[in-house]
Image (spheres, grey):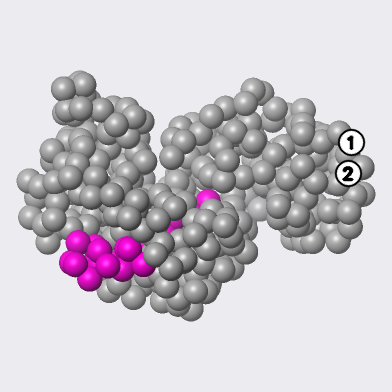
Amino acid sequence: MRFRRFGRTGLSIPVFSCGGMRYQHSWQDLADSEIPADNQKNLEATIHRSLEVGINHIETARGYGTSEIQLGKVLPSFSRDKIIVQTKVGVTATGAEFRTQFNESMKKLQLDHVDLLSVHGINNEELLNQTLAKGGCLEEARKIQKEGRARFIGFSTHGTCSEITRAIDTGEFDYVNLHWYFVNHLNWPAIEAASRQDMGVFIISPNDKGGKLYEPPQRLVELCAPLTPMQFNDLYCLSRPEVHTLSLGAAKPSDFDEHIKALDHYENAEKVVKPIEERLRSRLREVWGEDWMNRWPEGLPDYAQTPSEVNLPEILRLYTYAKGLDLVAWGQMRYNLLGQAGHWFPGQHIGKLGSMTELDPALARSPFKDKIPMLLQEAHELLLDKPVERISKS
């Protein structure tokens, strides 16, 4: 395993983290007696394997159903100074509610402290303001920190880059969990802002939201050879020193193996990644043209400034990579979540529009304003399947 300094926390964190939202039994809180023994056995085997390969950062959340209570049966068996534990508590209306939720997490985890406590889901301006308000989540989190029950305070986010950057620029947080990977470069300015603040940077879901890379299309497999698509994405992210750890949502012990093999190229990550990246970008330019690939996000407003809250940057990002790299299944998974997940995946697809002409003011600053309406229609035809619900609604 390789380790990086996790920003100003000073923690030496493995470059892969064991994310806790795939191996648990249920997305609902259940009693011990309702958790099947075979599921608990698999979870414990996954955690033991994680530690065996050097992944000693275990990450979960109050909103991950039985994840915490199941982890509470295995984590206390390890020396506390040998593991880094992170949990996340959602934004609440008051600090008292935040503490109640945190206390529930600690009860289930059976630990006296966590190393990393996140305010979970600062996904828009309203939630940030709520977090920062007097008597709010952050104030309570700092009290918990002073009590020695949480060492460092950070936040997780599924918001837009401008919203993430605003939260980072407050200087109030020690680290951030956010999305960024090969098929999503939009949040890079937020990572740069975090680097200026010397914050830890944790990448959310690079394997799933990053392209469903556990089920890659044949074209992507061929373009990424001799690496697998997951290994390429790992090294692509880790070739940036501003990135510190990637979440691996392991469902079983063997789910770590492919990523561990990627570390054979860790020292030469940039050199190994470069020719593969060029092949991928060449393919994208072949499909879309260089001008589109260089400038497509330019002048696009956030969903909140768009009629019917159509999420133009997200739709066009999904379509660009779905068409260019045959990532249609991934594009469908994400596109059909629009309008179904609230602030966790904000905005709508174009099915909410009465007429495409409603978008004319929103597209006025785009160099592709005449082309985008047609592309949105194409994206809708390719990606619309049926509405899906977010796995976790918390």
Q: Which residues are magenta?
A: 139-158
Asked if residue 315 lies in the magenta stretch, the reply is: no
Drawn side of residue 260 relative to residue 356, left or right: left
Badge 1 element: loop
Residues marked 2 and 1 touching at CB (< 8 Å): yes
Residue at image coords 77%, 61%: 298
Disc 2 from disc 1: Cα separation: 6 Å
Drawn side of residue 14 relative to residue 126, left or right: left
Badge 2 element: helix
Asked if residue 150 lies in the magenta stretch, the reply is: yes
Q: Quadrant of the N terminus?
A: bottom left
Image x and y of residue 175, in percent: 39, 66
- Residue 358: assigned label: 2
Image x and y of residue 44, in percent: 17, 36
- Residue 355: assigned label: 1
Vertical comparison of 41 with 71: above or below: above
How crowded is the residue under tag 2: few (<14 C-alpha within 10 Å), some, or many (20+)? few
Nearer the observer, 386 or 266? 386
The picture quadrant where one finds residue 302 is: bottom right
The picture quadrant where one finds residue 9 is: bottom left
Vertical comparison of 277 with 330: above or below: below
Q: Name the residue type under label 2.
A: Glu
Residue at image coords 62%, 45%: 346
